[in-house]
Image (cartoon, helix red, strand yellow):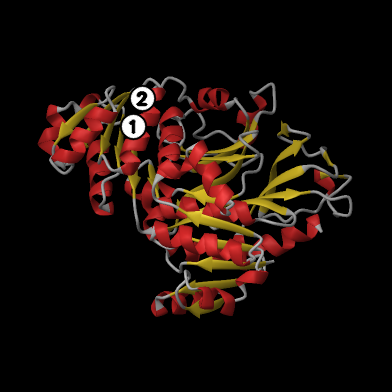
Amino acid sequence: MHIIIAGAGEVGFHIAKLLSRESQNITVVDLDKEKLEKIENKMDVLTYRGDSTSFAVLQEINVQHCDIFVAVTDLQNTNLVSALIAKKMGAKKSVARVSNPEYLKRENMLNVQRMGIDSLISPVDLAATEIFHLIEETAFNEIRSYENGLLNLLGTLLEPGSPLIGKSVREISERSIERISMPIAIARYEEGTNQLIIPRGDTVYQVDDQVYFLAVKNTSINLRKVLGKDKDALKDVMILGGGSIGFKAAKNLLKGNHRVKIIERDPKRAEVLAEELPGALVILGDARDTELWVEEGISDTDALVAVTGRSETNIMASLLAKNKGVKKTIALVENIDYIDLSQDIGIDTLINKKLMAADMIFKYVRQGRVLDRTVLADINAEILEYAVSEQASIAHTAIQDLKFPKNAIIGGIIRREIPIIPGKDFVVLPGDKVIVLTEHENIDNIARFFK
């Protein structure tokens, strides 16, 4: 598959990185020489220095023969124009990153599709939706869905007092009558770094373990009870920063009957927020003013969402909020390198809208047996969703007979739209979708089971 990526920034870099692991034919085009050199040095892809809105440049890189054209520069108009030109020149599909969520309204999406752009991706919308899910699912600091939520990845930190501490995986699983969830990975801090542990029956949970579960649709409440976190409802939410993400997050939370306060430093923006969000309390002030926080009842706030334009402000605000007893903190960061720090420094969740956009675009351009891929930032692991063909060596075989690598685990199966947490005697059939967790370097070994 020939894929052209317009934009060598963080989104483009991450997409190229994900796709290059699948040995795709990838070309990255950008005007920035240094960004292109960084990509050339890190992965096996072609690069071209030029303007992605130029007919001559697009013709030079054979856009007329490409399968998918992905426009992810930092400029919305550049993305829309280049994606439209690419499609008109012969690209089979085109995808554009947009900064204005208004484009995602159904009537606007239809107009864009009529013009020729197949799909739009909004990092703002993705980040706001993620914030809403994290507030709604109080016990978890990471949430990912497979097959529209039939199976869900739920990550949680085991704090002192958790009923899992000191218990083995087998002991906890024996308490459950149904197989509706299972642990598939543990990130444990040892020797100065997070170590990946694939949970087995005799694995014992420890304080500060970051545990990732796969759970069947609508069963997170059962898992919360097992974790002893079923009583934490986050109703009062304070949002620092009333920009596009803060606005959309507040709008979503108000629909979910949360009580929302927004602190915004710009008077004109605060007026707009008060007008557009009559259900929210909009406070004019600086997000860094801790005295203002105290006046506005930070100690009685259940969750703090820091989405100002400065990553450092968001991180420091979240740390201070934790000190004040806030149950859940979410901070927006621009630097992807910060993502690994969340549990280490005491923040519940760090989110990066560029990383989310890259992952979403990867899902859009996926092909072959790999249907989906989730990278766990804090450990050396990935979760992959495979389709099982009749010819696959995994087909018609019980899991216990597969001789699956020890540093990998099958966590879930989706069969005819039914989510299943399989036991060892479960027989995989053609047509199944299989969710596997594995270390990065083991992906090629896993792939052979699905060929």
Q: Quadrant of the C terminus?
A: bottom right
Mark 2 lies on residue: 254
Q: Dot 2, crowdedness within 10 Å: few (<14), some or many (≥20)? A: some
**Mark 2–mark 1 CB contact (< 8 Å):** yes
Residue 196: which disc? none
> Could you tell me which residue is drawn at 72 percent across and 50 percent down?
386
- Residue 171, how many percent across, how many down? 62, 30
Q: Position of residue 227 (x, y in %)?
A: 50, 28
Mark 1 crowdedness (10 Å alpha carbons): few <14, some 14-19, many ≥20: many
Q: Amino acid at mark 2?
A: Leu
Q: Is residue 215 above or below residue 43?
A: above
Tag 1: residue type?
Answer: Ala
- State which quadrant residue 393 falls in: bottom right
Quadrant of the rendered image containing residue 288:
top left
Residue 326 quadrant = top left
Give the image location of residue 135, x and y in percent: 40, 31
Residue at horizontal 61%, vertical 71%? 63
Q: Position of residue 168 (x, y in %)?
A: 59, 36
Q: 25 or 97, which is in the foreground?
A: 97
The residue labelled by disc 1 is: 250
Return the residue nearer the eye: 90 or 380.
Answer: 90
Q: Secondary structure at mark 1?
A: helix
